[in-house]
Amino acid sequence: MKIIIVGGVAGGMSAATRLRRLDETAQIIVFERGHYVSFANCGLPYFVGGIIRNRGDLLLQTPQSLGARFALDVRVDTEVVRIDRTAQTVSVRNVLTGDESIEHYDRLVLAAGASARSGATGSTIPTYTLRTVDDVDRITAVLAEAGAASAVVMGGGFIGLEAVENLVHRGVHVTLVQRGPQIFTPLDPEMAAPVLDRVRERGVDVRLNTTVTGTAGAGTVILSDGTTVPADLVIDASGVRPDVTLAEQAGLRIGESGGVWVDGTQATSDPLIFAVGDGVEKMDAVDGSGTLVTMAGLANRHGRSVADSIAGNTEHAAPALGTGILGIFGLTVALVGWSEKRLVAAGRAHRIAHTHPSNHAGYFPGAEGMSIKLLIDAESDAILGAQIVGGAGVDKRIDVLAVAMAAGLGASALTRLELAYAPQYASAKDPINQLGYVADNLAQGTSVNLQWHELEAARAAGAVLVDVRSAEEFAAGSIPGALNVSLDELRARLFELPRVPLIVHCQVGQRGHTAARILTESGFDAQNLDGGYRTWLAGTSSLMASPIAERVLV
């Protein structure tokens, strides 16, 4: 069997090497239009920042090493330009010489990935994406040769924020230009607020609701708000779009998400052609719809799956959760599943739990806080998504939640997970267990929570806000108009509270839950402000940071 693979990075090379392990007799040819294959694209920003010092560490394999170990015919600088499905051939062009040839295939795998969605507008300043080894070579050359002191990064997603951090690490002054009202848009506003704060604390000039419109001579970029900023270098991290050029030319089905449609075996609408990677539509784990998830882990996993399918060991791909993680200036940001914004847009009924635990026992030195948001189906108690921002321990918790989602565990079932505990690693009630307790209280009706963005409307309708923190905490910062009755004094001061709907809150929600139970048992109509003052402060600060932001959650 002759198998041709288009694309030699994550998905394509995983398919090629797995195929060889399953079939020693197959002829396997990999065409890669770039000059490098099997490189560590997720490590590219860290080479720019000098964290990874040896460029060779990014090059995991070469055509020669792949030929020696796996007997693969890997051809770089070679682009597949056409597919003839009737003849089962591809037309191939050498990008250096322009020479074209035709190759027959028995099976074809498309792993072309995604292409940059450029946000550049005729810049005369060196402007590059950050997706290939060639990109990194150009960027580091500008930084080294020109002695670049300033840079503009367009886009505040995964790649954009990694670029920002690494440029700052090199001593470059950075302006981050974000088209929308919030950086790192996969997060909900209150979860993104501490990320914005941390980026600004490190001296980054963040411009929200802004785009780059052009340049004003060497070293100056013009922004859509009418201002100019210095830039010896521009990095375009505006996003990516699925590369479906070949698939469209061949008449293959394109999914509603814009990626190449595939079935559970990674086969396209032509059973002899398969597709994997960032250019391919995945099945969403929450609602079963087609979605785009551009994660290296999925690309590698699906590359392995397509090899199994071609070799006759058919394995159906699991739905995609969209689990991701980012490190930015000492913060860890992680997410899985859907956000509240997406649930609201879809009109799906849900519950929310915010918690603010420490990564391990508070009495053990070095405890670091984190903020967790859990999204729960209002009817089935299924976990729909989660977001975590904090220090140590974030990665561990998001992985537990991702496994729980994949296993179909309900949110209340998190109370029953038996997780490893020692004071330096966790708490006796792990943050995951604590989430489960909150979720279970919501499911049982023991707690009735109000979200930070619902507070204004509830107070306008006549509800009274009661802050049950200590007088000292209240004096240090409070929600305007709140009454202060500390939890320890609450029972003795019930007569002071009006017989109207009450909303109680503490710092993070735990004391607020206890207060709400006291009030409910005493005949009051009481709700707990979910996540307490800390969540409200983060949420409202996100709106103040972008005053013209569309308030999609209000």
Image: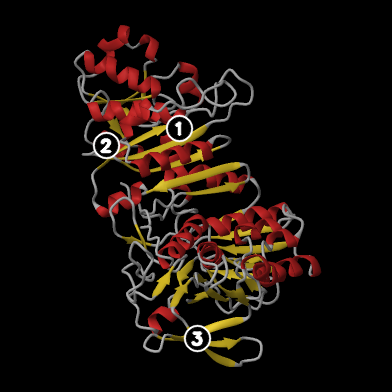
Q: Is residue 25 above or below residue 54?
A: below
Q: Foreground: 540 or 188? A: 188
In the drawing, what numbered circle is on residue 428? Answer: none
Element carrying mark 2: loop
Q: Which residue is mark 1?
A: 534
Disc 3 residue type (three-letter):
Val
Give the mark, 1 or 3, whose residue is nearer the N terminus.
3
Q: Foreground: 57 or 373? A: 57
**Could you give the CA–CA distance between mark 2 and mark 3, rounded to whole angstroms?**
49 Å
Element carrying mark 3: strand
Q: Which residue is mark 2?
A: 381
- Residue sitting at the far front: 25
Q: Is residue 375 above or below residue 34?
A: above
Q: Are marks 2 and 1 in contact (CB under 8 Å)?
A: no
- Residue drawn at x 32%, y 48% is 553
Disc 1 residue type (three-letter):
Arg
Give the mark, 2 or 1, whose residue is nearer the N terminus.
2
